[in-house]
Amino acid sequence: MILDNDPFFDGAWVESPSRGDLSMSFHSGFFQIHRDAHFRGDKIRILGVLSRSVRGKTRFEFRADYFSQAVDNREWQKNIAPDYEILNLYGAVDFPSHIRFTGDISRNLVAGSGTEQKSSDAFNLTVVAGRSKKRGGFQIIYQYLQFGGKAVSPHLVSYCRRVNVLGTHTTVNYFLTRSTVARFDFLNWRKLEADFPTSKRYRRWELALNHSF
């Protein structure tokens, strides 16, 4: 598997198969994110278990993962947690009425305690209503989330403002066709630990038109 922007092989992923209405599978992986030609960089290890079950038309899913990232500790990374040992628990319930509830909780076990505990925790509670992809269909996604500055590795988020925040993310999808969707996002966050007085609040509106081929 290749995870970054160099041509070197970064690691391997192993997963056991699962079948049936009540199934359980195990997965593990090891990766290294190369930062120079001497193959120095972050080392990542993952170990986890995934369970799925069906009761009538309702589907349940549970996942537990242990994620370890040994950060290549250089001068420019002094403001980042030196290591990440993250325990992640995830659960989801799918109802036949096109409503989905998910809960995702993470904690960095080596980030500290006491006043630092908030920055070592992350969670995402999500409600998804309406998953129809028919023309004229709507889908609404509401998320209440927190990403502590030491709970999530910066390499695993889409951009840096998603770290060290607490707030909500609301998404509305409108399906113009089965392949084309108009997407509206509203992000309303506040900083858990503000770097500057003006960075305490973050609001963002996003509009997108996506087409899948």
Image: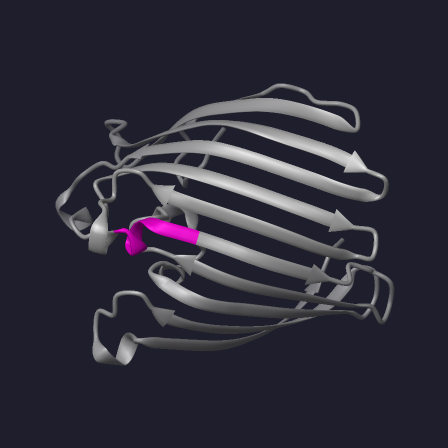
Residue 12 visible at all:
no
The percent position of residue 79, horizontal first and vertical second, equals: 18, 53
Q: Is residue 20 left or right of residue 103?
A: right
Q: Where is residue 208 in the image (x, y as percent from the top left)?
A: 62, 71
Compare residues 192 and 178 and report the one nearer the observer. 192
Q: Depth check: 73 or 103 in front? A: 103
Q: Position of residue 70 (x, y in %)?
A: 27, 33
Q: Is residue 127 above or below residue 75?
A: below
Residue 176 position by quadrant:
bottom right
119 drawn magenta: yes
The magenta span reads: 117-122
Q: In this view, does 45 lie to the left or right of 65?
A: left
Where, by quadrant of the figure, is residue 138 drawn? bottom right
> Residue placed at 28% from the left, 51% from the top?
117
Task: Look at 79% across and 29% down and name the residue there.
Answer: 21
Q: Does the magenta stretch include residue 35?
A: no
Residue in view at x 31 percent, y 49 percent: 120
Residue 128, compared with residue 170, is above or below; it is above
In this rendering, would 117 be left or right of 156? left
Closer to the camera, 124 or 5?
124
